[in-house]
């Protein structure tokens, strides 16, 4: 189950995720996290505490980034663990979401 | 006191509601079973037989229904087209998208000349639907030509199959060929690579449910265990190798419930060469 904490600084929001990003996170991401993120101009999603992302989690992440970008919000993803980054790379997430968002 | 006791009609209503719930459960269960039958029959289609080699595929869903997909399509030019894929998610939603993917593959397989073209056409056909549904599919598509032994493959965000060299008994991933998952980006043109297979060579396609299978300590089966199992069993028939891999996974997980669908497809070149 994914958990999150929000750290705001004016127009900037840092979201720290922790746990496994999978189907159990659907409601948390779609109903709580995305509406919260939409209130800011710049959002960073910190993946340091995420150990595992399955295909549903990957879909949730893609949807999260794409919906924020559509609203003109600048999104970055940071501190991705190597195992998770390997999966992102097989799926070519940097190409799909934009190389610049991985910092 | 009397006024707080449920009237006969209220009690009847409670019983009726319970019956409605029971009936709904039964109806839902029946529909899930029927959906599972449809999916299993479509998935377990005919395995092609051809001179010079053998193929086999198997899929074990984590739930009643799964989102993994494999298929064989014998082309009129004698080649065998193989596809292995993983639809985002699990259960009924993934199964519905798997049917959509199968339909796209079957429609374009005969009218496209190569695995890369097949993926290009499938992405073209599925992109809008997958975006609307916020979903995606990863796929490997490959052609094997039994006459020449040439194996050509293309990937849409799926990890590469393993190549087991029958002569020097080594295993490695096929040379990298990149491509975006179906539903990832529009108007993609996929690339492909070819290798020459020799007798006793094996190509092992799989989905991540195998390497990510977990035991009670949360450890994953990982690629190393898969490679070891394949090295120990590569001289057997495709059916026996497939069973060895499945047994090895079960031995490792020790009854821990499967988290993801497990799918594998094997292609093995026979000992007798067919003119190449």
Image: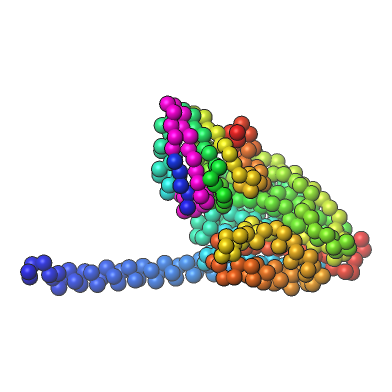
Q: Residue furthest top?
A: A10
The rendered magenta stretch, by its main secondary structure, is classed as: strand
Q: x and y percent of residue A103 in the render?
A: 60, 33
Q: x and y percent of residue A72 in the render?
A: 49, 28
Question: Where's the C terminus of chain B, which quadrant?
Answer: bottom right
Q: Nearer the viewer, residue B123 or B84?
A: B84
Q: x and y percent of residue B248 in the render?
A: 68, 69
Q: Residue at x 51, y 34 (%)?
A: A44
**Location of residue B240 with respect to B188 vertically, above or below:** below
Q: Residue at x 52, y 67 (%)?
A: B64
Q: Residue furthest front?
A: B217
Q: Range of the magenta residues? A: A6-26
Q: Is residue B216 visible?
A: yes
Would you identify the image quadrant in which residue A102 lies?
A: top right
Q: Residue at x 84, y 53 (%)?
A: B195
Q: Residue at x 72, y 44 (%)?
A: B178
Would you identify the image quadrant in which residue B266 lies?
A: bottom right
Q: Nearer the viewer, residue A72 or B29?
A: A72
Q: Is residue B182 visible?
A: no
Question: Where's the N terminus of chain B, which quadrant?
Answer: bottom left
Q: x and y percent of residue B78 in the render?
A: 80, 61
Q: Is residue B6 left or right of residue B262?
A: left
Q: Nearer the viewer, residue B133 or B271?
A: B271
**Location of residue A99 with respect to B47 vertically, above or below:** above
Q: Is residue B26 left or right of residue A67?
A: left
Q: Is residue B14 left or right of residue B7?
A: right
Q: Nearer the viewer, residue B186 or A92?
A: A92
Q: Residue furthest right?
A: B275
Q: Is residue B163 magenta?
A: no
Q: Is residue A21 magenta?
A: yes
């Amino acid at each position: 189950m994914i958990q999150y904490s929000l750290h705001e600084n004016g127009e900037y929001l840092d979201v720290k995720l922790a746990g496994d990003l999978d189907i159990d996170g659907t409601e948390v991401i779609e109903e709580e996290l995305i509406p919260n993120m939409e209130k800011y101009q710049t959002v960073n999603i910190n993946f340091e505490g995420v150990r595992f992302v399955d295909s549903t989690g990957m879909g949730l992440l893609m949807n999260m980034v794409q919906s924020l970008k559509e609203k003109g919000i600048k999104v970055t993803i940071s501190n991705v663990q190597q195992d998770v980054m390997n999966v992102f790379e097989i799926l070519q997430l940097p190409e799909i979401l934009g190389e610049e968002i991985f910092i | 006191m009397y006024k707080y006791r449920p009237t006969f009609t209220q009690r009847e209503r409670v019983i009726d509601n319970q019956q409605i719930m029971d009936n709904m459960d039964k109806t839902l269960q029946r529909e899930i079973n029927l959906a599972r039958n449809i999916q299993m029959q479509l998935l377990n289609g005919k395995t092609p037989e051809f001179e010079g080699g053998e193929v086999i595929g198997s899929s074990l869903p984590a739930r009643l229904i799964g989102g993994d997909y494999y298929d064989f399509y014998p082309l009129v030019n004698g080649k065998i087209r193989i596809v292995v894929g993983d639809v985002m998610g699990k259960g009924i939603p993934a199964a519905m998208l798997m049917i959509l993917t199968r339909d796209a593959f079957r429609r374009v397989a005969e009218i496209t000349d190569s695995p890369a073209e097949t993926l290009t056409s499938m992405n073209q056909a599925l992109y809008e639907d997958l975006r609307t549904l916020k979903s995606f599919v990863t796929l490997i598509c490959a052609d094997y030509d039994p006459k020449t032994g040439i194996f050509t493959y293309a990937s849409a965000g799926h990890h590469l199959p393993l190549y087991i060299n029958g002569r020097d008994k080594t295993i490695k991933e096929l040379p990298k060929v990149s491509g975006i998952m179906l539903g990832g980006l529009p108007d993609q043109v996929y690339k492909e690579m070819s290798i020459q297979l020799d007798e006793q060579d094996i190509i092992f396609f799989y989905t991540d449910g195998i390497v990510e299978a977990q035991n009670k300590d949360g450890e994953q089966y990982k690629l190393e265990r898969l490679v070891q199992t394949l090295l120990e069993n590569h001289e057997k028939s495709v059916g026996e190798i497939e069973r060895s891999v499945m047994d090895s996974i079960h031995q490792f997980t020790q009854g821990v419930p499967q988290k993801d669908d497990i799918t594998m497809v094997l292609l093995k070149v026979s000992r007798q060469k067919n003119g190449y």
